[in-house]
Amino acid sequence: MKRKLFSAMLGAFALLLLMGAASVPTQPAAALLAEEESAVLSNTALETEAQSLDTQFTQAVEAATGIDPTEAAVPVSASGTLSINGQPAPQSLNQRNVQNTTYVALAAMAQALTPYAKCDWDGSTMTITTDRLSLTAKVGQLYVEANGRYLYIPEQVQLDEAGQVSVPLRTAAKAFDARVDYDGATAAITVTSGSGAIVPGDSFYNQGDLFWLSRVIYRESGNQSLEGQMAVGNVVLNRVADPTPAFPNTVEEVLAQKNQFSTYASGVLRKTEPSPSSIIAAKLVMDGGVVEETRGALYFDSKANSWAARNKQLITTFGGHNFYG
């Protein structure tokens, strides 16, 4: 016992001597700084190694209990801000931001809202089928079709980095008649199921409005892009919705207004056969689709010296027309 005590005392004395020697400033400041940085790096390396061992231990425990380590390491909702019917959104939803719009994987969203939804993919088009809903989404298209309804997607149907068909969250929710709520304070998005399917187009679209709107779109912009055709349709519906007495309250009355649409007055419009794209453009705007570049426009023309050009504020030139507020 005495030997052990004596040995311990000698060890302590030697340690004190070493500490004293280390305190003598025999090295330049730069060398001391280098040593301190080296010590910090060494400590960091030790901490990293300890964390790695801790992670390995945790994963070993998870594996032993049947939990997949790769799933346990990532929250169920990568952003932690999206829930569906009170549950965190599944990772397969692959929530992402596209031009300030929340996009989600369509198949995953469909099955989160309706577990028995059937999802088919032919290489370009995703088809979703339930007992109440038939939906198609073609990659690169400006809309999805759901129960004969046409829902506008300005940034198009996309493929995400995982190769999944991706659409705006609100578009998918609308197709399934689900409600989307956003809490600005917490950035939390909640989705709540509704009836399970959007009201079919046959009963949603006013057939009289569709008749006239599709024909005026074709006559005024049938040779333009789909969004160019939509922009013309937006102007007509903007006039219908305008609260001032400047415009009537129905599509046909807007077209019949004096000195506005000559094709209506001449009877040509009624005899016009609309193209498939003009019918789709009419349905898109009747379903709330708005071409952002021409938002709020009440007039359009294709002439440099028209009445609107001389009297109204130019919003933009889009497609083959100038649009005015």
Image: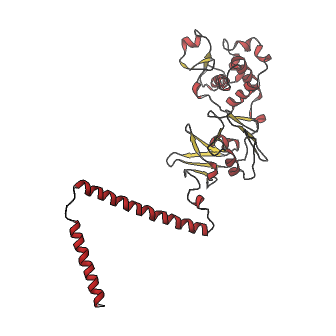
**x, y percentage for residue 55?**
51, 64
Q: Residue furthest top?
A: 305
Using the image, determine if residue 262 lies above or below residue 23.
Answer: above
Q: Which residue is at 62% across, 45% downward? A: 180
Is 251 on the left or on the right of 17, as rendered?
right
Using the image, determine if residue 322 lies above or below residue 36.
Answer: above
Is 73 on the left or on the right of 48, as rendered?
right
**x, y percentage for residue 312?**
55, 16
Using the image, determine if residue 149 lies above or below residue 299.
Answer: below
User: Could you tell me which quadrant the N terminus lies in?
Assistant: bottom left
Front residue of 142/196: it is 142
User: Could you tell me which quadrant the C terminus lies in?
Assistant: top right
Q: How many marks?
A: 0
How is the structure coloured here? secondary structure
Q: Which residue is at 21% across, 65% downward? A: 23
**x, y percentage for residue 137?**
71, 38
**x, y percentage for residue 217?**
70, 21
Would you identify the image quadrant in which residue 258 lies?
Answer: top right
Would you identify the image quadrant in which residue 4 lies?
Answer: bottom left
Is 2 on the left or on the right of 53, as rendered?
left
